[in-house]
Image: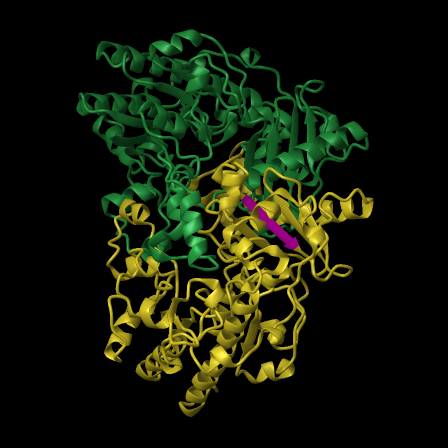
Chain colours: A green, B yellow
C-alpha cells in the first residue's frame, strides 16, 4: 500500500551504501531508502535556514505565494518574532520564545502540515494508505504565532524539576551534559519561563490543528477505517535536571506520548482508558503490520503489535524492560570527556520502577522512581546491596536484549520449523552421517513424513 | 581490485532482499552480493548431487570432458569408492571412507580446484587481485582417490578424545547433539577408523596440491608479491566428544588452522614462528585492507589487521577473548529440545584458558583448558566459587562484545572527530541553545576555529 511521509524527517540516504549497491538515489527505491521507507509526499527537514538541507522547501514557496516574501521566508516570518514595540528578533534566541511569531497562525508550519495531510487524504481517495504525518513543532525554535503566543503565562507551566544535589559529584556524562550550551542557557534567569510560554502555545496549537484534521477526517468518513497513533520521537528537558534538548534518559525525554485510536470494535474494550504496559516506538511498525493483516516478522522487527493491549487482552509474555539507546558522539560532552566516538554510547533499561543506565567507560546510573519519581538521586554508585542487586539485574536484562538474535533476518522461524523431518534425512541425495546402506533404510523406516 | 571466488561457497543471495532493493540478481552487484562480495571465477557449492544447488557445475562438465561420464559424474566417480573386489559403493556411507575414490587423483576436486586457481593467476597477469581459493576437501564425503586412500592406517590417527564421564548428566544441548545421527554413527565400531584413513589422505592431498600451487607461483614470480593465508572455516569432531560434524565449540572445531605467508620484509621478524594471540576469522578482511593500503574501518568491520603480529609487534590493545557463535536452528537438537529457532543460539568466549559457552534457555558450559586440555569436564554447573567467578567474568566479556557499536556504520569515528568546534556553534544559521544575541557573540569569541 501507499506509505507516505508528510512533514519532517532528518533521514538522509547513505550515499556510499547506495553507490556500492548500484541503487540510483533518484529511483523510487533510492528515494524510499533515503526517506525511511516512505514516499515523500511532503518533506521538510526542519528547515535549516542556510545549511544546505532543503535549500528551498515547499513551505518557503508556500509562504511566498501567500505574500510572506524574502530569501528565506521561514526565517523572516515563521522564525522571527515581534516585540511589544514592533521590533523584530530571531526566534532562535531563547529569551524571545514568549513573543509571537510574525507569521499568522493559519500559515504557520503546523497549520501548513495539517493542510498538506488533508490534501493527501483527498487525493488518496479510496486507496488504502499509511501516512507518517510528522509535525515539526513543538520544537526549537520554540516560537508560536498569536493567539497561541499569548495564551499562557509562566505560572501555567509545571514547575522545573531540578535540585542542587544533582550537581554535587554528578555522573561524568550527566555532568558534562549540564555544561552543554543549551543546558547552561536554560539555567539562566527567565529563559525557561520564556520558552515554556512558547512551548505551551505550540502544544495548544497542535491540539487545535489535530482537532481540525479529525473533523475533516470525520467529514470524509475516514474515522471509521483509520487507525490514528499520536506519538513523539523524544521529549525535551526544557531546563529539567539542569539540561536542555534530548540526550540522556530522564522521564521528560523517554516517556513520550502515545495515544492510539483504533476504530476496530474490539478496541471498544479499552476506549478512553490508559495502559501502563512497557511499550516502545519499535512496536508501531508491527502494530501496523497486524492491522493490515500481515504476518509478524520477529526475526526482522524487534517490536510487537500493540493490538492485544488495545483489545483489552494481556499478552502471556511481554517485555519486562523498555530499552533506549543514546549515541552522544556528536555532542560536546564527548569532547569534554575525551571519549572516542565508538565508546560514546549509553543504554537504558527501565522496568517501570528502576531505571538503569549503562555508560561505556563510566559507572552506571540508577534511579528508583518509586521513592524518587523525579529522578533526582542517582544510585549508580550506591553501596547499598539492594541497589547493587537492581543494577546487576537490569545489567543482565540489557545483555538479554543485546543478544536477541538478529543475524538470521532472511529466514523466519516459521520457515525453519516447517522443514520436514523426512527432508532432513536425505535432502537431494546428501546423506550426511550414515554409516552404511542399512543405516539409511532403518532411518527411513523410523521417520514418517510429517504433515504440518 | 579484482576479488574472485575459486571453489566452494554455500552463500546464496537473499532473493527477497534483492527484490526489495530492486537489484537484479544477474547484475554484477547482484552476483557479488550472492557470492559474499566476490566475482565467481569458479563456484562449486559442494556439489549437492540431486538437490537443485548447482545442477550441473563446471566440475561435472570437466569430468565428462575427461571421460568420466554419466548424469552426475561427481557422484559416480569422485564420490564412489571401489572395494578390494572391484565393487562400487557410495562414498556417503562413512564405513567406506577408507576405500579409494573411483576418480584418479589428478582429476579429483582438490586437483581441479588447484588447476582453476592456476588458470586464474595466469589470466590475471600483472593486475592486482585477491583470490578466495576455497577447497571443498577435507570434508564429507570423506573419500580420497589413490594413492592417498592407501597412505595411512587407523593407527596413524590421533586417538579419539572422549570419555564416558562426558555422557553422565551432560548439558542438554551437548547431550542432544551426541544423539545427532552423525554423532551416533561416529560412535559405532570401525566408523572413526575408516573416516580417519580417508581424512588423513585428504589432508595429505591438499598439502601436495598446495605444494604444486606454490611451485607454480614461484615460477610465475608471484611469491614475492602475494600474501598467502591458509585457513579453514571450521574443524570437524570426527567422533571426538561423541560428536560428528561441526556444532559446538570444542577445540577440534574452533581451533582452526591459520598460516600466514607475508612476503613483506618486515614479516621476516616472525617467519617460521608460531603466534599464540587470540585471533579470529574476522581479522582477515582488515588484514587484507591493511596490506592494500586501505584505512581501517572499525565502525564497519569487527576484526583487526594481523599485520602487527606478523611484523613481530605486540599491539597495545588486543582482544582478551575470542568469540564464536552457533545457530543450531537447523539441527535436530533444536527439535529434541523443543527450542524455538529464535532461541537456538550459543555463544562462546575463550580467553586462552577458560572457555565459557552461553546457551539461550539452558545453563552455561565452562571448560578449564589448563587443567583439562581435552575439555572432558564441563564446569558450567560447578558450585566452586572460583568457577562461578570465571563464568561471571566471561559472561560479562560476551556482553561487552555484544554491545560493540555497530549501529553507526555510515559515519566513521574519524569523520565525527574532524567536525570543527566552530561549525558546532552555528552551523548554517541553526542557533541551538543561545539565550540571546550577546550569547552568540560571547561564544564566537570563546571558540577559535581549530585546524586539524
Q: Quadrant of the N terminus of chain A?
A: top left
> Can you tell which quarter of the image residue B240 is in?
bottom right
Q: Which residues are magenta?
A: B345-349
For image coordinates 53% across by 34% down, the residue present is B433
Q: Nearer the viewer, residue B63 or B79?
A: B79
Up-down relation of residue B176 to residue A132 (above or below): below
The x, y position of residue A91, in whole percent, is 44, 29
Assess whether residue A103 is covered by the magenta stretch.
no
Q: Position of residue A207 (x, y in %)?
A: 39, 14
**Could you tell me what secondary structure mostly forms the magenta stretch?**
strand
Please state the horizontal and vertical placement of residue A4, each as a whole percent of the image: 28, 31
Q: Nearer the viewer, residue B83 or A362?
A: B83
Whether residue A40 sits left or right of residue B265 in the image: it is: left
Is B7 drawn above or below residue A162 in the view shown? below
Residue name at image x 46 percent, y 46 percent? B330
Total number of numbered discs in the rendering: 0
Q: Left or right: where does residue A243 sit relative to residue A203?
A: right
Residue B395 vs B289, above or below: the answer is above
> Where is residue A146, by image quadrant?
top left
Work out which quarter of the rendered image holds the C terminus of chain A and state it.
top left
Amino acid at each position: 500500500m501507499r506509505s507516505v511521509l508528510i512533514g519532517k524527517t532528518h533521514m538522509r540516504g547513505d550515499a556510499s551504501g547506495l553507490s556500492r549497491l548500484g541503487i540510483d538515489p533518484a529511483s523510487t527505491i533510492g528515494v524510499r531508502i533515503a526517506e525511511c521507507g516512505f514516499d515523500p509526499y511532503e518533506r521538510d527537514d526542519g528547515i535549516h535556514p542556510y545549511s544546505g538541507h532543503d535549500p528551498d522547501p515547499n513551505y518557503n514557496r508556500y509562504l511566498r505565494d501567500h505574500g510572506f516574501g524574502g530569501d528565506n521566508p521561514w526565517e523572516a516570518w515563521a522564525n522571527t518574532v515581534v516585540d511589544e514595540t514592533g521590533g523584530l528578533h530571531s526566534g532562535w534566541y531563547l529569551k524571545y520564545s514568549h513573543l509571537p511569531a510574525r507569521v499568522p497562525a493559519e500559515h504557520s508550519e503546523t497549520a501548513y502540515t495539517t493542510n498538506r495531510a488533508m490534501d493527501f487524504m483527498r487525493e488518496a481517495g479510496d486507496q488504502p494508505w499509511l501516512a507518517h504525518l510528522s509535525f515539526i513543532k513543538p520544537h526549537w525554535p520554540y516560537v508560536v504565532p498569536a493567539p497561541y503566543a499569548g495564551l499562557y503565562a509562566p505560572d501555567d507551566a509545571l514547575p522545573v524539576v531540578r535540585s542542587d544535589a544533582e550537581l554535587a559529584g554528578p555522573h561524568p556524562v550527566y555532568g558534562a551534559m549540564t555544561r552543554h550550551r543549551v543546558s547552561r542557557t536554560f539555567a539562566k534567569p527567565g529563559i525557561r519561563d520564556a520558552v515554556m510560554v512558547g512551548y505551551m502555545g505550540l502544544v495548544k496549537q497542535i491540539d487545535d490543528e489535530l482537532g481540525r484534521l479529525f473533523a475533516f477526517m470525520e467529514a470524509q468518513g475516514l474515522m471509521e477505517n483509520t487507525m490514528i497513533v499520536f506519538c513523539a520521537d523524544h521529549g525535551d528537558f526544557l531546563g529539567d535536571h539542569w539540561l536542555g534538548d534530548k540526550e540522556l534518559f530522564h522521564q521528560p525525554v523517554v516517556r513520550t506520548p502515545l495515544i492510539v485510536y483504533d476504530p476496530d470494535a474490539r478496541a471498544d474494550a479499552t476506549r478512553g482508558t490508559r495502559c501502563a504496559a512497557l511499550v516502545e516506538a519499535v512496536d508501531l511498525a508491527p502494530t501496523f503490520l497486524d492491522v493490515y493483516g500481515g504476518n509478524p516478522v520477529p526475526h526482522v522487527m524487534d517490536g510487537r503489535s500493540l493490538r492485544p493491549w488495545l483489545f483489552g487482552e494481556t499478552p502471556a509474555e511481554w517485555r519486562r524492560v523498555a530499552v533506549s539507546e543514546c549515541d552522544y558522539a556528536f555532542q560536546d560532552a564527548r569532547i569534554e570527556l575525551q571519549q572516542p566516538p565508538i565508546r560514546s554510547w549509553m543504554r537504558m533499561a527501565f522496568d517501570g520502577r528502576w531505571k538503569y543506565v549503562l555508560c561505556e567507560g563510566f559507572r552506571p546510573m540508577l534511579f528508583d522512581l518509586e521513592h524518587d519519581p523525579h529522578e533526582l538521586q542517582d544510585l549508580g554508585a550506591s553501596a547499598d546491596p539492594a541497589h547493587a542487586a537492581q543494577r546487576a539485574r537490569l545489567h543482565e536484562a540489557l545483555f538479554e536484549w543485546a543478544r536477541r538474535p538478529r543475524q538470521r533476518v532472511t529466514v523466519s522461524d516459521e520457515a525453519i520449523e516447517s522443514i520436514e523431518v523426512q527432508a532432513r534425512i536425505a535432502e537431494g541425495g546428501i546423506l550426511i552421517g550414515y554409516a552404511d546402506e542399512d543405516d539409511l533404510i532403518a532411518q527411513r523406516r523410523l521417520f514418517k513424513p510429517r504433515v504440518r
